[in-house]
Amino acid sequence: MAWLSITLELDPPEAEALSEALLEAGAQSVTLESTSDDPSTLEPGKRMRVVALAEAATDPAAIVSAAAKQAAIAPPAFTLAKVEEQDWVRRSQSQFGPIRIAELLWIVPSWHAPPDLAAVVIRLDPGLAFGTGSHVSTRLVLQYLESNMRAGGIQRPRVLDYGCGSGILAIVAGKFGAGEITATDIDPQALATTVANAAANGVDLTVAAPESLAPGTFDLVLANILAGPLIELEPLLAARTRMGGRIVLSGILESQAAEVAAAYAPHFAMRLLASAESWALVGGERR
C-alpha cells in the first residue's frame, strides 16, 4: 500500500502547533525534524520541518487547511511525495528512538532495548494517536507527573486523562502510583490505542468516550489538547475536578497561557507550572 508524505517548513512554534493539529485533521503519523545541520540544537532563525503521512487517497490541501485552522495559523505551503508501506515502517523506526523525559523516566519503542534498567520505562510505539513523548507539550506534563507523583507529592490520586491520544499521560500516572485511572477521547482510534498501550505497560485503567464517562470527580485532571478546545472545555473539566483537586493543562503556546489561565480562574487558583521551547504548562487547585 502506498502513502502520501506531506512536508512543510515552519517556524518552531507554528510547527509544534501544526503537528498535533495534522493528526486531528486525519494524518496517520507526524514527525518534526530540525532543518539545522545539527539536529540537537535549534539555531536562531532556523525553521522546522513537519512531515505528515496520510493515506494515498487523502486530499492533502484539505488536511493542511483544516490543521492550520485548528492551530490558528495561515495555511502553509507544502510538498508531496509517495511513500511505500515498507519505506514508511523503516523510516518510522529509524526516527523514533528512546526518549529521556526525566532523570528516571524513559519512553522506549518496542524495537529498542531500555537504555536504563533502573528507570521507569514506558513502552510506546508511534502510531495513529497523538502522544509519543517527543512533543514538548507532552514532555511538560510527563515531567510534572514525575516530579509531583514519583516523589510522593500526590498520593494515589484518582486521575482523568481528557483527550488521551495514545494514553501516555494516563500510563505514566499509573506507573507513578495513581489509584483509579480513567482515559477519554472523542477519537475511537485513540481509545483503542490507549487500551493496547496500557496493556503493554501493565497499567489498569478505564477507557470511555466523553459522553460515556461515569459520574464523579477526580483528584487530578490532565488535558494535553490545544488552547482553543481547552478554553471551551473549562466548565466540563471544572465539574470533573473535586474541590481541592488539581488540573494540569498543556498544548498551550506561551503566548496563550494567560488566556487559558484566565478562562479557568473562576474555578481554579491558576498559575504557570512550567515552560519550554515556546510551550507552556498551566494548572491549579479547584476551589
Image (tube, rainbow, N blue to C red):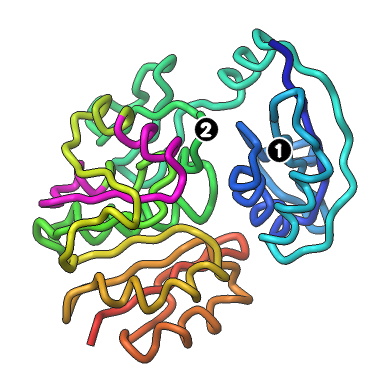
Q: Earlier in the sequence, mark 2 or mark 1?
A: 1
Q: Which residue is mark 2?
A: 128
Which region shows up in magenta?
Answer: 173-195
Amino acid type, callout 1: Glu
Name which residue lies at 40% across and 50% down. Answer: 185
Amino acid type, callout 2: Leu
Toward the bottom, the furthest residue is 266
Residue 6 placement (x, y as % from top left): 79, 34
Name which residue lies at 20% across and 44% down. Answer: 206
The answer to which of 68 and 246 lies nearer the viewer is: 68
Q: Which residue is mark 1?
A: 33
192 w.r.t. 237: above or below: above
Name which residue lies at 14% across and 60% down. Answer: 157
Is disc 1 placed on a helix, strand or loop? strand
- How far separated are the C-alphas under marks 2 and 1? 19 Å
**Quarter of the rendering containing residue 171:** top left
Residue 210 placement (x, y as % from top left): 34, 56
Question: Along the horizontal axis of the image, is 62 left or right of 266?
Answer: right
**Quarter of the rendering containing residue 61:** top right
The answer to which of 268 and 100 lies nearer the viewer is: 268
Quadrant in which the C terminus is drawn: bottom left
Question: Along the horizontal axis of the image, is 114 left or right of 214?
Answer: right
The answer to which of 274 and 42 lies nearer the viewer is: 274
Q: Residue 213: which disc?
A: none
Report if residue 192 lies within the magenta region: yes
Question: Along the horizontal axis of the image, is 174 left or right of 284?
Answer: left
Name which residue lies at 19% across and 47% down. Answer: 176
Is disc 2 placed on a helix, strand or loop? loop
Residue 214 placement (x, y as % from top left): 19, 57
